[in-house]
């Protein structure tokens, strides 16, 4: 089954959930390593999404000025 495309809000929610688990000390060492890797992936995804969105908005605004 193909993976559903992740939205920015879903990524942020997942990051928040993982951080709550970490703060609540609900993770063992093995899980912690995997969760840190996942958060890293999600942060990278969010940064890229924000950058892409910013570029698209700038492009649209520039086109509106023409």
Image: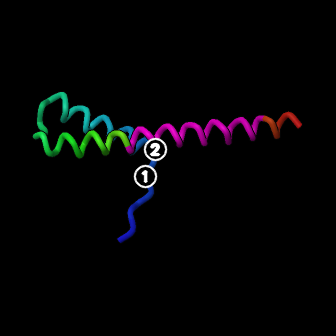
Which quarter of the figure is the N terminus placed in? bottom left
Which quarter of the figure is the C terminus placed in? top right
The residue that disc 1 covers is: 6
Nearer-the-camera pick, 39 or 2: 39
Q: Which mark is residue 47?
A: none
Q: What is the x, y in percent for residue 28? A: 10, 40
10 Å crowding of disc 1: few (<14), some (14-19), many (20+): few
Instruction: Look at the numbered discs 2 and 1 and tell me whether their residues touch, using CB distance below 8 Å.
Output: yes
The residue that disc 2 covers is: 45
**Residue 57 located within the stretch drawn in magenta:** yes
* Image-based side of 19 in relation to 46, left or right: left
* Image-based side of 8 in relation to 63, left or right: left
Which is the main secondary structure of the residues drawn in magenta?
A: helix
Q: Which residues are magenta?
A: 41-61
**Secondary structure beneath label 1:** loop
Q: What is the x, y in percent for residue 47? A: 50, 37
Earlier along the polypeptide chain: callout 2 or callout 1? 1
């Amino acid at each position: 089954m193909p993976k559903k495309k992740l939205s920015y809000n879903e990524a942020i929610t997942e990051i928040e959930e993982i951080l709550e688990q970490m703060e609540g000390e609900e993770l063992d060492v093995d899980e912690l390593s995997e969760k840190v890797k996942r958060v890293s992936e999600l942060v990278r995804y969010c940064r890229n999404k924000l950058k892409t969105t910013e570029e698209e908005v700038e492009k649209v605004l520039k086109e509106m000025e023409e």
